[in-house]
Amino acid sequence: MIVLNKVFHFCAAHRYGNPALSEAENLAAFGEDLNIHGHNYELTVSVTGAVNPATGFLLDLGHLKQVVKEHVIKQVDHSQIEIDVPWFKGKQPSTENMVVWMWEQIASQLKGGTLHRIRLQETPTIYTDYFGPD
């Protein structure tokens, strides 16, 4: 199996917290992340499929870049995710939730390949992989 990976970058802020929890419960669950803070994210979109023998390519990278930039990066770059992206209303802006949202944004738009994995790196030591819905 061939897997093609394309890396994207964006900057965004977020704040964790649950209005159903008390201040003490929120502090215990989220610590300093109750404060608005930001990250320089690295997003890796992995696509698989058959290589076109005429081009030697799995898919048109220009198309992949356009889909990801239009449907993901444009929505989150320089945003406060849980406020500016409607899908996150009432949801935590965690990388675990973000990769699910990103998958939904990309998979339905992709032509010429199959989405294999979304990897979202939040810090040099934290990243989340998502291989799609079960």
Image: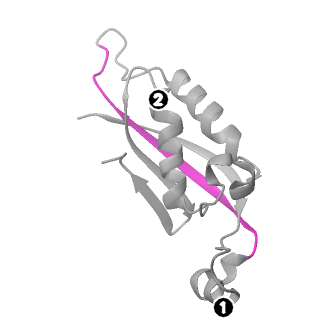
What percent of the width, then of the height, locates residue 102?
A: 53, 44
Look at 50% across and 26% down and name the residue there.
109
Q: In which quadrant of the rendered view does residue 88 lie?
A: bottom right
107 lies left or right of 76: left
What percent of the width, then of the height, locates residue 7?
A: 53, 42
Spatial CA distance of label 1 from label 2 is: 41 Å
Q: What element carries label 1?
A: helix
Residue type at mark 2: give it. Ser
Q: Which of 54 and 70 is in front in this view?
A: 70
Q: Is residue 15 above or below residue 129?
A: below
Other-residue count near label 1 (Cα within 10 Å), few / some / many at <14 / 14–19 / ≥20: few
Is label 1 or label 2 in front? Answer: 1
Look at 68% across and 82% down and name the residue there.
32
What percent of the width, then of the height, locates residue 39?
A: 67, 62
Q: In this view, does 57 lie above or below 97?
A: above
Look at 49% across and 46% down and name the residue there.
44
Residue 60 included in the magenta stretch of the image: no
Range drawn in magenta: 35-52
Look at 56% across and 63% down and name the residue there.
94
Residue 51 included in the magenta stretch of the image: yes
63 lies left or right of 59: right
Q: Residue 108 has which mark?
A: 2
Q: What element carries label 2?
A: loop
Q: Is residue 75 above or below residue 83?
A: above
Which residue, as the protein is rendered here, is positioned at the far top? 54
Judging by the rendered image, the residue that carries numbered circle 1 is 24
Q: Which of marks 1 and 2 is nearer the N terminus?
A: 1
Other-residue count near label 2 (Cα within 10 Å), few / some / many at <14 / 14–19 / ≥20: few
What percent of the width, then of the height, locates residue 60?
A: 47, 20
Q: In this view, does 77 lie above or below 128?
A: above
Residue type at mark 1: give it. Ala
Which residue, as the protein is rendered here, is positioned at the far bottom? 24
